[in-house]
Image: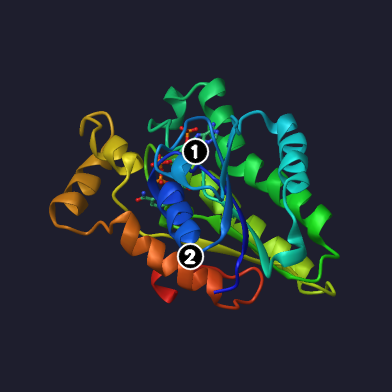
C-alpha cells in the first residue's frame, strides 16, 4: 500500500485503535484524536496522540493546523483523514431525549466530521499526492430504527455529506477520494452498550443480543483487513461502500 500519514478520530479503542495499529505495523504515521489514550498505540514511535473532545467544534481547525504543522509530506505517497469517532447514545425515543444529548451526538458524529473534512480539503486541495477521506458510516444511516433516531440521522447525514463532497471533488484537478464505509457489526464497546440495554427500555437491544449470540459480529482485526483494502483501492469520490467490498 501507499505509505503515508493517517489522521484518525476515535483511536482510544474499538475500530479506530485497531485500524491505527495495523497502519502503524505497515510503516505508516498515524495522528490519533480522542479524549482517552490507547496504551497499545502509545508504544509506536510513529504514533502521535491528540487529546481532544470533538464536541469542541471551534477547536477543530486549530487542532488540524497543529497536526499539519507536524506532518512532512515530502516523503509521503498519501495523506488520509478517517472520520471514525461517533457516539451511539441517546438510545431513547425522541420525546425522551433532551437538547443537550441530541446536540452532543450530532456534534461528535456529524458536525465534527464535516468540519474536519472542510479544513482537510482547504489545506490539501493543491497537494499533488494521493489524498483520501474515509467517513465511517453505518447500516443505521439507511435503516430506520426506533429509539436510535439521533444516531441514525447522524449516519444518514454522513452518507449524504460524503456524496455531496464527492460531487464537488470530481471537478477538481487533484480530487480527494472521499467515501463512506458501512463497517457492518463489529465487537467493540459500542456493541456492548447497545446489547447491555434493558429490552423494555430499548427494543432493539434484543436484536443486538441475538446478533452477538449467533456469532454475527466481526472482530476489529477482521474489519481492519477490509479497511486496509478499501484504503488501497481507488474508489470513485462520493461512493458509499460496504466493508466486504474491500
Ligand atoms: N461497532 C459496530 O458494530 C459499528 C457498527 C456500525 C458503525 N460503527 C461505527 O464505527 C465507528 C467506530 O465505532 P466503535 O464501535 O469502534 O466505537 P467505540 O468502541 O465506542 O469507540 C468510539 C471511539 O470514538 C471516540 N470518541 C467518542 N466520543 C468522542 C469525543 N467526544 N471526542 C473524541 N473522540 C470521541 C472514543 O474515544 P474517547 O471516548 O476516548 O474520546 C473512541 O475512541 C463509529 O463511527 C460507529 O458509529 C460501528
Q: Is residue 121 above or below residue 26?
A: above
Residue 243: quadrant of the picture: bottom left
Q: Is residue 43 left or right of residue 46?
A: left
Residue 165 found in image quarter: bottom right
Disc 1 under 8 Å from ligand 1? The reply is: no
Mark 2, secondary structure of its residue: loop
Q: Say whether residue 133 is left or right of residue 9.
A: right
Percent across and percent down for residue 229 are 47, 73
- From the top left corner, tell me how far across and down residue 94 is, in percent: 46, 31
Please, is residue 85 above or below residue 164 in the view? above
Q: Quadrant of ligand 1?
A: top left
Camera-side residue of 134 and 42: 42
Question: Residue visible at 30% across and 35% down?
Answer: 193
> Which of the colour schemes (rainbow, by chain, secondary structure, one colour) is used?
rainbow
Where's the C terminus, which quadrant?
bottom left
Q: Residue at x 48, y 43 (%)?
A: 11
Report x, y in % for residue 79. 67, 61
* Inter-mark Cα distance, 1 to 2: 36 Å
Q: Which mark is residue 56?
A: none
Is 120 rendered above or below residue 12?
below
Q: Is 6 left, or right, of 142 in this rendering?
A: right
Q: Which mark is residue 150?
A: 1
Would residue 185 be seen by someone viewing this image from the given angle?
no
Judging by the rendered image, the residue that carries numbered circle 2 is 26
Amino acid at each position: 500500500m501507499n505509505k503515508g500519514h493517517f489522521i484518525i478520530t476515535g483511536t482510544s479503542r474499538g475500530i479506530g485503535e485497531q485500524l491505527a495499529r495495523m497502519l502503524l505495523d505497515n510503516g505508516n504515521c498515524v495522528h490519533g484524536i480522542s479524549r482517552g489514550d490507547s496504551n497499545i498505540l502509545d508504544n509506536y514511535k510513529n504514533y502521535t496522540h491528540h487529546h481532544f473532545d470533538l464536541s469542541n467544534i471551534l477547536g477543530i481547525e486549530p487542532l488540524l493546523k497543529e497536526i499539519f504543522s507536524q506532518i512532512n509530506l515530502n516523503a509521503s505517497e498519501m495523506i488520509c483523514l478517517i472520520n471514525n469517532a461517533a457516539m451511539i447514545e441517546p438510545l431513547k425515543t425522541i420525546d425522551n431525549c433532551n437538547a443537550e444529548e441530541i446536540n452532543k451526538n450530532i456534534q461528535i458524529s456529524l458536525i465534527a466530521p464535516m468540519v474536519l473534512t472542510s479544513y482537510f480539503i482547504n489545506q490539501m486541495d493543491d497537494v499533488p499526492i494521493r489524498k483520501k477521506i474515509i467517513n465511517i458510516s453505518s447500516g443505521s444511516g439507511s435503516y430506520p430504527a426506533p429509539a436510535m433516531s439521533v444516531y441514525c440521522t447522524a449516519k444518514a447525514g454522513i452518507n449524504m455529506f460524503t456524496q455531496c463532497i464527492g460531487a464537488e471533488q470530481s471537478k477538481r484537478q487533484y480530487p480527494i477520494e472521499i467515501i463512506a464505509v458501512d463497517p457492518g457489526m463489529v465487537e467493540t464497546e459500542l456493541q456492548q452498550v447497545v446489547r447491555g440495554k434493558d429490552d423494555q427500555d430499548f427494543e432493539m437491544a434484543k436484536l443486538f443480543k441475538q446478533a452477538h449470540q449467533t456469532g454475527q459480529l466481526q472482530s476489529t482485526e477482521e474489519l481492519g483487513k477490509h479497511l486496509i483494502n478499501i484504503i488501497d483501492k481507488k474508489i470513485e469520490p462520493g461512493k458509499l461502500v460496504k466493508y466486504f467490498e474491500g
